[in-house]
Image (cartoon, grey):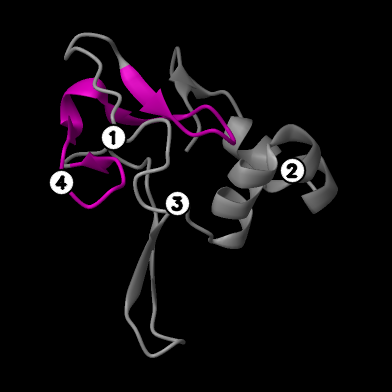
Amino acid sequence: MSKKIDGKTDGKADENKRKTEAEWKDQLTDAEYYVLRQKGTEPAGTGKLEKFYPTKDEGHFVCAGCANPLYSASAKFDSGCGWPAFDKCYTGSINTHVDDSLGVRTFYFF
């Protein structure tokens, strides 16, 4: 999702789509690369955002890869699952993919 500034997109989404895997590896930590580029996940309860609860007026969470806004701080809640949970996202900020290839239905959000 590109940000709109004065009615024009900033082109950041297009810039990120053109990055090579080597460029992504250089930009991201190993853990971020695993999650963002290889559809990985961190073990439940280990993420730095799991127990982080900003106040409702403290802004939003952004993508570690492109810095686009994903969720408002007020959308975060404790689901008890071990990962940060959000009940709303910014329009156009999240894509989904359902993967049944391992015999278990898995939902990816990116």
Q: Is residue 55 left or right of residue 92?
A: left
SS label for mark 4: loop
SS label for mark 2: helix
Which kind of residue does numbered mark 3 sit on?
Phe
Report the magenta residues as a range: 60-86
For the point 56% across and 49% down, the residue is 36
Between the C-alphas of marks 2 and 4, the distance is 31 Å
How many marks do you count on the picture?
4
Circles 1 and 3, Cβ within 8 Å, touching? The answer is no
Between the C-alphas of marks 4 and 1, the distance is 19 Å
> Badge 2 is on which residue?
24
Label 2 neighbour load within 10 Å: few <14, some 14-19, many 20+: some
> Badge 1 is on which residue?
90
> Please, is residue 1 above or below residue 3 in the view?
below
Figure quadrant of residue 103? bottom left
Which kind of residue does numbered mark 4 sit on?
Ser
Q: Is residue 65 left or right of residue 63?
A: right
Circles 2 and 4, Cβ within 8 Å, touching? The answer is no
Would residue 80 be counted in the magenta stretch? yes
Q: Is residue 86 left or right of residue 44?
A: left
> Badge 4 is on which residue?
79
The residue closer to the viewer here, 49 or 6, is: 49
